Amino acid sequence: MDWIVVGGYVFALLVITIFSLEQLYLAILYMRKKQTTTSTPPLSHFPQVTIQLPVYNEKYVVKRLIDCICALDYPLDRLEIQVLDDSTDETKHLIAERVAYWQSKGINIEQISRPERVGFKAGALQYGLEHASGELIAIFDADFLPEKDFLLSTLPHFKPETGMVQTRWGHLNENYSLLTRMQAFGLNAHFSVEQTGRNSSGKFMNFNGTAGIWRKQCIEEAGGWHYDTLTEDLDLSYRAQLKGWKFTYLENITSPAELPVLVPAIKSQQYRWNKGAAEVARKNALSILKSSQSLHVKLHAVLHLFNSSVFLFLFLAATLSVPMLLIKQNRPEYQLVFQAATVFVVGFIAMSIFYWVAARATTPNFNLRYYLKHFPLFLTFTMGMALHNAIAVAEGYLGIKSPFIRTPKFNIRNKKDSWKGNTYLRQQLTPLTLLEGFFAAYFAAGVAIDIWLQDWGLVLFHGMLAIGLGAVFILSVKPLRTTG
């Protein structure tokens, strides 16, 4: 039995290290790219553009969304706006009012409601696509507020072979709380280092579901929007690139959006992203390996699609690390194996460099103090989400289907705004939340065992897990008490 625990622990650390080295590689690519940044070319002509706004029960943010999109700087005769409205509450009436107002101002905007909400967001996008007049399709989720010159800045980057152009996400409420700052810290790494590194080196990248523009022909040739995964954006991205279409990432163009301010809302978002990524990997991995792409592109595509697996191996390593303490004390014959497990240090250094590069590139007035404060907190919260995300990934690989659960929006932009009374926040005390509380105690016991055995190698790891899971447990329960 001991060898199973030891083998599983070492294997999990090895996998985590591989993914961490991939992050280091992307950081190196990013730094190279930053030295050769080019300016935006002028827009030579104005193609027909359709903007799609998929909306489902967004009464707190839908008015500001429509007003922002209708204020975009673009010739009115070349612009069509589709509000893809699947709402079942008063949002539908709010949309109708704003659509009528902007129609009276000469804006070509339409409220489109389907007979049935089949396929959730993907189904809405596909339904709208079949009625779209634009050769280019821009998509914005309900919490996004793009800059007025969004179209004028992005459209010049479309070449004949370009299927999609993605912009960087900004954050309307980054400084609202510690939770929003930690989310921004992690997202900035994806939207700076990862996306730029992949795109600049010819690797496959992904559309992020919003704040990007597709060529309609590209979507159609790739087979349209599918709703058999929770991340229809990642799925279509890979199918399109396997068809030979090229993507462009624009780090210098930012589309601001609202970050979730409560752990239950973060959980719904993280669940969808991680389970959906696993579903897409399950669906497309074989097609990638069989494709005519170079071995280099295939390797990084597979690492990209399976990246959410890190949570599975992180939680496996964490869980096994506690019994490993006792095995280490009583089985000296495993000492060589324990020493091999220090390969994780290499992965940790690689990951630290990755987030250093990202934070330095995206943080105004960046300094060492900022990094030393936010990086450990981000890691602790990530560890706290490990159980939740690991279950989501496992469900994705096992083919367990679940509905598309949207992330609740709160219309929060500064500390004066409040989420209390939000009618979309419907949380229950789930078995998973209770399990997070149990594992917080489990890793706290791990800290006690570390101290008892005077084995200090894992005390920090166990401490961060206990604090992270404990915080996620408490912050998952807290909104229940507040909202009743």
Image: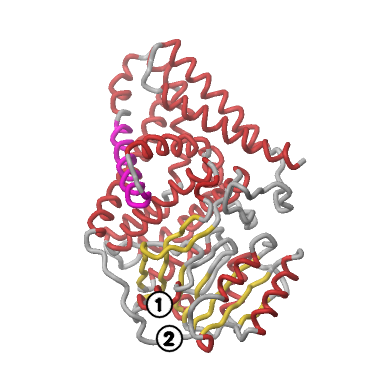
Q: Residue at x 54, y 49 (%)?
A: 270
Q: Residue 94 versus residue 197: which sits nearer the camera?
A: 94
Mark 2 is on which residue type? Answer: Phe
Majority secondary structure in the magenta region: helix
**Quarter holding the C terminus?**
top right
**Quarter holding the N terminus?**
top left
Mark 1 is on which residue type? Answer: Leu
Tell me where residue 165 sits by quadrant.
bottom left
Residue 395 within the magenta-colored segment of the rendering = no
Residue 169 image offset from top left, x and y in percent: 46, 59
Residue 408 image offset from top left, x and y in percent: 64, 54
Q: How is the image coloured?
A: secondary structure
Mark drawn on residue 476:
none
Q: Which residue is mark 2?
A: 46
Tell me where residue 7 sits by quadrant.
top left
| Secondary element at tag 2 | loop
In the figure, 432 relative to 331: above or below? below
Q: Residue at x 47, y 79 (%)?
A: 136
Judged left or right of residue 76, residue 369 is left
Query: CB of mark 2 within 8 Å of CB of mark 1?
Result: yes
Residue 357 within the magenta-colored segment of the rendering = yes
Tell me where residue 431 sits by quadrant.
top right
Judged left or right of residue 237, residue 229 is right
Q: Residue 66 versus residue 1: which sits nearer the camera?
A: 66
Q: Residue furthest bottom?
A: 77
Q: Which residue is mark 1?
A: 155
Residue 223 image offset from top left, x and y in percent: 49, 74
Q: Residues within 10 Å of mark 2 (few under 14, many from 20)?
A: some
Residues in magenta?
343-364
